[in-house]
Amino acid sequence: MLSGHLDSTFAALADPTRRAILARLAAGEASVGELAAPFAMSQPAISKHLKVLEKAGLVSRGRDAQRRPVRAEAAPLAAATQWMETYRAALEMNFRRLDDLLEDLKAARAAPTKGKPKGEPA
């Protein structure tokens, strides 16, 4: 089940407009009209983006009289971050091992060889 949630989170985040909407919502809730203002697209187009974000659980809509404020939800981003962190840590460990190996190889090349006449390859 986690895979499906991650899939919908990453699919929603793949679009730059949706990322910009989330960035705006990080500052606080907003109406659809407020979210649409900076974009050269209609409110219905913004609403479609919001539906994708809502389906992924990245935003929720409230009710405040006639207003339906949209707010960001942190849980799906936390799950995606945790998933990425697992792989980041593993890759960093691999890079550290590679760095150590390269340092060992450099040291072995730089060390003078004993018992070999000058001019012979080591």
Image (tube, rainbow, N blue to C red):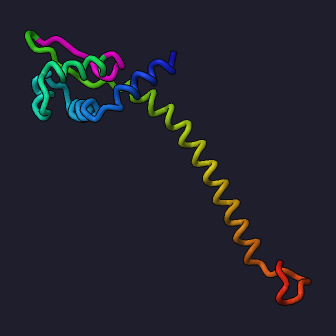
Who's the residue at 13% across and 12% down the image? 64
* Image coords of residue 57 (percent x, y): 35, 19
Taking the view exactly as shown, the residue that stands out farthest to the right is: 115
Residue 26 seen by the camera:
no
Please count the marks in the image. 0
Taking the view exactly as shown, the residue that stands out farthest to the bottom is: 118
Q: In which quarter of the image is residue 68?
A: top left
Please say if 9 is above or below 68.
below
Q: Tell me which secondary structure the magenta stretch mostly adopts.
A: loop
Q: Give the range drawn in magenta.
A: 55-64
The front one of 17 and 24 is: 17
Look at the image and tell me in which quarter the C terminus lies.
Answer: bottom right
The front one of 33 and 43 is: 43
Please say if 58 is above or below 105.
above
Who's the residue at 27% across and 25% down the image? 72
Who's the residue at 21% across and 33% down the image? 24
Who's the residue at 20% across and 14% down the image? 62
Taking the view exactly as shown, the residue that stands out farthest to the left is: 66
* Image coords of residue 120 (percent x, y): 85, 84
73 horizontally vs 105: left or right: left
2 horizontally vs 49: left or right: right
* Image coords of residue 39 (percent x, y): 14, 33
* Image coords of residue 27 (percent x, y): 21, 34
State yes or no: residue 23 in magenta.
Answer: no
10 horizontally vs 115: left or right: left
Q: In which quarter of the image is residue 90?
A: top right
Residue 98 seen by the camera:
yes
